[in-house]
Amino acid sequence: MDLESISAIVKDIREEVSKVIIGQKKTLDLMLTSLLCGGHVLLEGVPGSGKTLIVQSFAASIDLQFGRIQFTPDMMPGDVLGVNLFNFQTNSFVITPGPIFTQILLADEINRTPPKTQAALLQAMSERQVTIDRQTYPLGNEFMVVATQNPIEQQGTYPLPEAQLDRFLFKIAIDYPNMEEERKIVRRHGQYSAMPKISDFSVNARVNRQILTDARAITAGIRLTDALIDYIVDIVRTTRQHHAIETGASTRAATMMSAAARAYAAVNGRDFVIPDDIKYLAIPLLRHRIVMTPASDIEGVTGDNALRAIIDETPAPR
């Protein structure tokens, strides 16, 4: 496995996803970056923006087990993790695994379930294992959560707590397509009112578990200079000092950014990280890790605005 092989993987996944999805290049780039460095992704967009379809297409292009949880307000942690049930034939308790026991997990409408159920994902996302009745079960290194939520609905939703948000590598804002892309979408998917089925588009799995493991090993060795490490740390530390930000990003954000920068360089066929990689990743990687001051809301200063200012003001190494 070498960088050319990773470039081939990236090309293959893009080709398969493009059979279903039109546009969304940045979204797919960030999902590929997350895949290569073992991160989790939160997709946020208005209803009907294709969030679920993007995840399904992405998962179909990879030969890993895919699972989905449709979160609802009445869901309990056991519905996610699984439970121990008593078997009267063997006179013993037997674990009944929940839907979290998969490799790529679509957590659909994650903010529709209460914090108690959301918290069932914390250990899984951080440690790739779960504990049920004091027994720990591994989920495997390939375990990846791709969650969706929409930003405009308030009724029946529960905002994700900061500890939950911090587990996601990226929070990706799904934008509206441009006019030409929207025309193509209507031409391709406008025959039926229901969501298209991935099986109708002949999406093939082009990447298997071993290929992914080898690609991640190569990605981890991408060169990140001390000057760029300092640049990452400077950006993260500045979020803790900005006048519009009440709580800045954690040290975990800096370590995740270094891993993501290596993966993004690999996605672009390079064996070294450049400052532009860090600038490109900083907003989707940090926007969900900062808490804005009440005054900033009144003044109309958003988290993305503050992060852009920090990136512009932080000197990048040459």
Image (cartoon, helix red, strand yellow):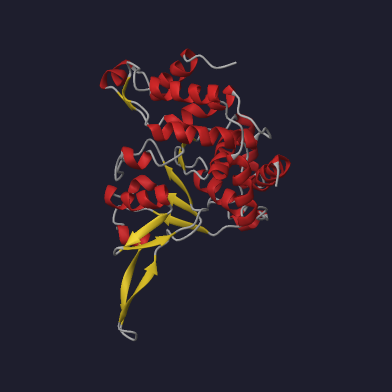
User: Is residue 184 shown to the viewer in this render?
Assistant: yes
User: Is residue 175 shown to the viewer in this render?
Assistant: no
Give x and y (percent) for residue 247.
Answer: 31, 26
Name the residue nearer the viewer: 114 or 161: 161
Q: Relative to 58, is 295 above or below? A: above
Name the residue nearer the viewer: 216 or 283: 216
Q: Is residue 29 left or right of residue 167?
A: right
Numbered marks: total: 0
- Quadrant that contains the C terminus: top right
Name the residue nearer the viewer: 126 or 43: 126
Q: Relative to 226, is 24 above or below? A: below
- Which corner quadrant of the image does residue 133 belong to? bottom left
- Taking the spot 49% from the left edge, 32% from the top edge, the residue there is 257
- Taking the spot 63% from the left edge, 43% from the top edge, the residue there is 218
Give x and y (percent) for residue 92.
Answer: 31, 80
Name the residue nearer the viewer: 212 or 207: 212
Q: Relative to 28, is 284 above or below? A: above
- Taking the spot 42% from the left edge, 19% from the top edge, the residue there is 305
Point out the residue furthest to the front here: 226
Give x and y (percent) for residue 109.
Answer: 40, 47
Point out the residue furthest to the bottom here: 89
- Which corner quadrant of the image does residue 131 belong to? bottom left
Give x and y (percent) for residue 221.
Answer: 60, 39
Q: Is residue 224 left or right of residue 248?
A: right
